[in-house]
Structure formats: structure tokens, C-alpha cells
Image (spheres, helix red, strand yellow):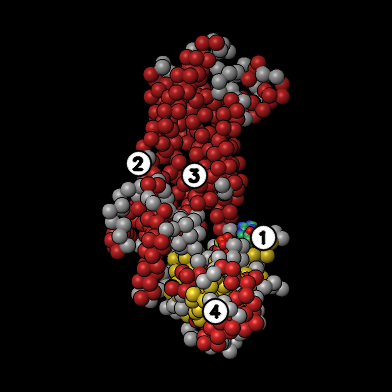
């Protein structure tokens, strides 16, 4: 638990009047995946850029792989990989040429750079496309190439800024598999994402950021536990939605949300409820329920709940 | 020692990158090489028939040094658009996150541009020889003229690096490219400056394009030496080109390196 490979304390960064980071703290344990979640403009990219030595914070400090990102930027760069929000490969070169170039620029010997390029292309299923220009790649292939371009030097810490934004489910699955494989090899991954299921599936720890500050942190399960379970009800007749809502409001103490023509969802208070009790109450109100289900909240619901409250 | 060696290796890797881009996109190279050849035909035959060379002489002989200068100045635009594209696509960020020397990027880019420039100059010389242009003063002065072009081109490439980092957006950079034409036209490259209105003539006389054109005419022994009492850069064109080069390097190398380190 104490072996944090990324530690950031009180990071601040402003652009003119825009405060992108307002005292951000972050810890990532070695060998884990940490997902940084946040709405647009929360400061995710800014935080990654500071940690990857691309921009210096106005205040606060950060250590990555044991080195200060400002004072020992060179040491940090030798130990990290970065795949930014936009695929950063040369579209006019082939995939192989890109990897060889980044290998050389990471100070591998020529032979090692060539060997590593072939190895990565093979391992991530790009060998067939390796000698085509990247300009002709699909979005998913480009992202994959971008990801492996950050691996040429076997980074200790890998920063991925929205690695699957804009990809179809299959492309996302491929990136996820790649990330899991890397973590199995001992790489630490810090990724930002707007997809909650991505964080849910990949991350050991989640940090929710809003307005340049951390508003929650924990494992996905811990975060879900903070807002309690949810009750979903499907009624047989849409006309029964109103009385059903009244019943749920009475039971849960909060307003349920309508999630479809014939369905409602409500957050339950800490103690939770017995399913049998819910069914009995609905019956008494004359509501015919097609389905009543108690479940853990999704990370989406946690996220919405966390980010909707005004932060000061 | 190893630091310096790596910086050099990084620079060479990036030169290799630019050459690789050209190899994979030969259309771009062909277009870049066509441009000067088209200019020879366009100006040499289309406009040339209507222009009088001061002091007499063949217009195409007069024109070629101007086209050499124009090709030389195209490096600003080329390097600017490539640098801006890297900066806007995040390629620059990747470079900056690598343990490479940060100065390698501009050195690589300007170095590659120099190779491309030499190739373009060679095509231009061949086109000139085809249309009857000659270097009349022998290989020594001709080599000096080429050297001047190379030196100024390299200095201009650094201005291109800085401009590219300043705009940081390849669409803006592309939109700026057409400005190149009026800039090179307001000079002595295509017509003598003597007939221009006073204020325009002043701009044209002090335009570095004019200094390079005048220097090339002098060293190649081509017609068009300014008559009467020309402005200082035209009276001392070789010194003027060297001064321009030194000034551009002194300004834009530190500015660009600082922008890269930022
Ligand atoms: N270079 C910059 N100049 C000016 N403002 C900036 C710059 N970079 C970021 N910002 C601003 O800082 C804030 C945080 O931006 P950042 O890109 O870090 O957010 P993000 O969480 O990555 O958002 P997204 O999900 O849209 O990628 C935004 O308001 C943004 O407009
Ligand atoms: Mg972002």
C-alpha cells in the first residue's frame, strides 16, 4: 500500500484565468491501474502532462518512479511512456518506421530498436499493417500503434490519456487487453477516461477529478458503496408509473428517476431495504410490477452523483 | 561526450524521419520539385516576354538568380508547416516525453530541410541550364553563390521552426503559406525595383530576397546589376546575405530552443 510509484501533492496549474488544476493530489500504487475520471475540462489532460514532464506545475510537486518531475525530468522521461489524447504518430511513415524512430529517440541501439519494433508489432497484432503508411490505418489500429509507440522502452509507468475515446467496442477491447497484459508484466498504468465501464473493468483504483481537484478516490467497489444500492422497478402498465414512484419515494426518502417508459430507479439509503417489503408496498398501492431488482450502483451513477454536487 | 553523441544521433534520426516521409510520399517530393521548374516556364516565357532587363541581356539569365532566391526562401514555409503539424498533432509531445535531447527536433528538421533544399536547387540549376542560363564566372564564384543560398536557407529554416511553434496549428500554418508569394515578389527577383513607387521600392530593396538575388547575379555573372546609386544591401549583396543569415540565426535559434524547452 505504501509503495506509491506516482505521488502528486497540491498540484496547481493555471492558463491565464483558467485554473486547470487547483491543488490536485494523486497516488498510484506500483503495479496497479489507476483511472482518473472526470468530466470535460476537469483537468485530466493537464495532470497527465505535468506528470509526464511536458509542463511544469505552478505550485505543488510530483514524483514519478522516484524522481521529481520538474528537477529530474530527464530521469522521469527515461522511465515513463505516454500516449496522449490524440494519436501522436507520424502519419506519413509506416508503422514500423514510426516504432523504429521512437526506439532510436528513446536511445535504444539501432539493432535493438529494430528488434523491439518487430516484437511489439507482432505482439499487438500489427505485423500485417507494419509496412503501410499510418495515414491509411483505421482509428483503432492507429491508437494501438500509438500505445505501443509508448512501450518501446518498457516504461515503468505508462500514462494513457483517454486511450479508447472514439473507438468501437472491438477497438476498445483490444486496448483493454493490451493494458491488462502490460500490467501483468509489472507496468504501472495511469489512465484517464470518460467511460466509466472502462474504469470499472480495468482499474484497481479510481480517482474522480472535477474542477482541478480530487473529489473522491477508492476502488470501484468502495466508490459504489459510498452512494448505496439502487432499486430498479419495471411496471407492467406505464400508467402505473406515478403511483409506483410515490411508493418508492416513501420507501427510499428520495425522488426516483424515470429510466424508461415503464421503469424507475432510486438510490437507497445506507441500510438498504428488503426486496419482499418493496413488493408488498407496491402491491398495496395496486401497482403490478413486472420486475423488482436490487443492485449495486454503476460507476456512472456514482460519477453523476459526485460531479453534480457543487464543489467549492 | 555520450550526451553530445546522443544529441547528434537524435538529430540524424529526425533527419532520417523527414527523408522517410519523402520516400513514402513521393508525390509530395515531385510536387516540391515541379514547383521551381514550373516557375522557370511561367516567368521565363510567359511574363519574361514583356519585361525589359535593365542594361540589356536575356530575361531568363536575369530571372534564374531570382528563382534560386525564391526556392531558398520556401524553406520558411516548409519548415513552419511541418513544425506546426507536429505541434498540433501531439507528435511534439511524444518527442518531449522521450529521454532525447529536446534540441534534436529543430536541428533534425532544419538539417532535413537543407537536404531537400539542395535537391531542389539542383533541379532548379538543371532547369536553368535547359533554358539557356549559365554561370559565367566559373566554378569558384558559382560555388560561393550556392554556399550563400545554403547558409541563408539554413537560417531561414530556423525562422520557420519558430513560426511553426508560434502558430501551433497546422491549419493556420497552411493558411499562411500563400503570403510567401507577395513576399518574394516585392523584390528584384522578377523585375527591377527602379520602376516601383518609392515606398514599395524601399521595401523591395531591403527585402532579403533582393540581397540574395543580387548576390547570385553578381557571382554567376548574370545581367541586372543595379544601376546608379543602389540601396546598401544591393550595393553589397554578399555582405548583406551574410548579415541577414547571422541575424536570423542569432534571433531564431535561441528563441526556438527556448520554445522547445518550455
Ligand atoms: N494550453 C492551454 N491553454 C489554455 N487553457 C487550457 C490549456 N490546456 C488546458 N486548458 C484549460 O484547462 C482546463 C482543463 O483542461 P484539461 O484539458 O486538463 O481537461 P480534461 O479533463 O483533459 O478535459 P477533456 O475530458 O475534455 O479532455 C480546461 O478548462 C481547458 O480549457
Ligand atoms: Mg483531456
Mark 1 vs mark 3: same chain? no
Q: What subunit carries mark 1?
A: A
- Locate residue B196, reporting x and y percent: 67, 18
Which percent across, then down, holds residue A104? 37, 58
Residue A74 seen = no
Q: Does the residue labelled 4 lie within 8 Å of ligand 1?
A: no
Q: What element carries label 1?
A: strand
Measure the C-alpha gap from mark 4 to mark 1: 43 Å
Which tag is nearer the camera, tag 1 or tag 3? 1
Q: Is mark 1 within 8 Å of ligand 1?
A: yes
Residue occupied by mark 1: A15
Q: Element under label 3? A: helix
Whole-number angstrom distance, CA of label 2 to CA of label 3: 16 Å
Q: Earlier in the sequence, mark 2 or mark 3?
A: 2
Q: Residue at x 28, y 61 (%)?
A: A122
Camera-side mark, 2 or 4: 4
Camera-nearest label, 4 or 1: 4
| In the rendered image, residues at marks 4 and 3 fall on the same chain | no
Q: Mark 3 lies on which chain?
A: B
Structural distance between the alpha carbons of marks 2 and 4: 62 Å
Disc 4: which residue: A231
> To which residue does mark 3 refer?
B82
Front residue of this view, candidates A238 and B258: A238
- Specify few, some or many for label 4: CA neighbours under 10 Å numbering under 14, 14-19, or 20 or more: many
- On the image, the x and y values in percent for residue A164 come to 45, 62
User: Which chain is indicated by disc 2?
Assistant: B
Report the residue at 37% width, 67% height from top. A178
Name the quadrant of the C terminus of chain A: bottom right
C-alpha gap between disc 4 and disc 3: 56 Å
Whether pointer 4 and pointer 3 mark residues with C-beta atoms closer than 8 Å, the reply is no
The disc placed on residue B23 is: 2
Amino acid at each position: 500500500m505504501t509503495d506509491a510509484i506516482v505521488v502528486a501533492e497540491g498540484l496547481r496549474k493555471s492558463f491565464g484565468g483558467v485554473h486547470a488544476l487547483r491543488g490536485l493530489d494523486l497516488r498510484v500504487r506500483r503495479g496497479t491501474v489507476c483511472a482518473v475520471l472526470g468530466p470535460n475540462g476537469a483537468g485530466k489532460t493537464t495532470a497527465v502532462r505535468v506528470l509526464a514532464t511536458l509542463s511544469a506545475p505552478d505550485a505543488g510537486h510530483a514524483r514519478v518512479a522516484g524522481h521529481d518531475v520538474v528537477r529530474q525530468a530527464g530521469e522521469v522521461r527515461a522511465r515513463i511512456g505516454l500516449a496522449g489524447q490524440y494519436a501522436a504518430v507520424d502519419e506519413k511513415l509506416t508503422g514500423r518506421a514510426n516504432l523504429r524512430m521512437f526506439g532510436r529517440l528513446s536511445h535504444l541501439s539501432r539493432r535493438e530498436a529494430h528488434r523491439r519494433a518487430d516484437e511489439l508489432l507482432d505482439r499487438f497484432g500489427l505485423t500485417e499493417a507494419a509496412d503501410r503508411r499510418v495515414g491509411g490505418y483505421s482509428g483503432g489500429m492507429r491508437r494501438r500503434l500509438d500505445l505501443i509507440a509508448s512501450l518501446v522502452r518498457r516504461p515503468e509507468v505508462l500514462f494513457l490519456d483517454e486511450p479508447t475515446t472514439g473507438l468501437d467496442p472491438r477497438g476498445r477491447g483490444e486496448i483493454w487487453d493490451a493494458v491488462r497484459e502490460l500490467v501483468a508484466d509489472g507496468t504501472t498504468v495511469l489512465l484517464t477516461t470518460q467511460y466509466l465501464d472502462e474504469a470499472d473493468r480495468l482499474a484497481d483504483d479510481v480517482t474522480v477529478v472535477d474542477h482541478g481537484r480530487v473529489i473522491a478516490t477508492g476502488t470501484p467497489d468502495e466508490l459504489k458503496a459510498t452512494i448505496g444500492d439502487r432499486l430498479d422497478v419495471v411496471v407492467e402498465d406505464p400508467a402505473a408509473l406515478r403511483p409506483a414512484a410515490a411508493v418508492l419515494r416513501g420507501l427510499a426518502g428520495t425522488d426516483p428517476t424515470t429510466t424508461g417508459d415503464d421503469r424507475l430507479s432510486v438510490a437507497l439509503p445506507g441500510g438498504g431495504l428488503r426486496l419482499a417489503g418493496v413488493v408488498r408496498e407496491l402491491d398495496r398501492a395496486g401497482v403490478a410490477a413486472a420486475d423488482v431488482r436490487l443492485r449495486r450502483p454503476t460507476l456512472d451513477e456514482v460519477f453523476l452523483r459526485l460531479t453534480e454536487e457543487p464543489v467549492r | 561526450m555520450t550526451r553530445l553523441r546522443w544529441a547528434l544521433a537524435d538529430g540524424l534520426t529526425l533527419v532520417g524521419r523527414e527523408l522517410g516521409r519523402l520516400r513514402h510520399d513521393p508525390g509530395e517530393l515531385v510536387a516540391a520539385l515541379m514547383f521551381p521548374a514550373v516557375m522557370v516556364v511561367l516567368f521565363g516565357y510567359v511574363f519574361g516576354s514583356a519585361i525589359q532587363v535593365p542594361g540589356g541581356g536575356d530575361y531568363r539569365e536575369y530571372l534564374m538568380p531570382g528563382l534560386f532566391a525564391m526556392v531558398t526562401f520556401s524553406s520558411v514555409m516548409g519548415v513552419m508547416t511541418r513544425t506546426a503539424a507536429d505541434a498540433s498533432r501531439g507528435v511534439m509531445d511524444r518527442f518531449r516525453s522521450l529521454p532525447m535531447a529536446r534540441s534534436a527536433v529543430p536541428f533534425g528538421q532544419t538539417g532535413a530541410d537543407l537536404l531537400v533544399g539542395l535537391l531542389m536547387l539542383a533541379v532548379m540549376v538543371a532547369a536553368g541550364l535547359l533554358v539557356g542560363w549559365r554561370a559565367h564566372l566559373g566554378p569558384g564564384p558559382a560555388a560561393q553563390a550556392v554556399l550563400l543560398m545554403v547558409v541563408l536557407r539554413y537560417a531561414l529554416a530556423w525562422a520557420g521552426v519558430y513560426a511553426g511553434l508560434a502558430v501551433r496549428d497546422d491549419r493556420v500554418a497552411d493558411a499562411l503559406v500563400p503570403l510567401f508569394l507577395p513576399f518574394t515578389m516585392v523584390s528584384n527577383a522578377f523585375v527591377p525595383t527602379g520602376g516601383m513607387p518609392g515606398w514599395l521600392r524601399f521595401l523591395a530593396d531591403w527585402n532579403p530576397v533582393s540581397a540574395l538575388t543580387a548576390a547570385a547575379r553578381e557571382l554567376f555573372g548574370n545581367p541586372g546589376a543595379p544601376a546608379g546609386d543602389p540601396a546598401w544591401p544591393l550595393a553589397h549583396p554578399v555582405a548583406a546575405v551574410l548579415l541577414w543569415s547571422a541575424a536570423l540565426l542569432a534571433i531564431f535559434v535561441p528563441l526556438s530552443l527556448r520554445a522547445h524547452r518550455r
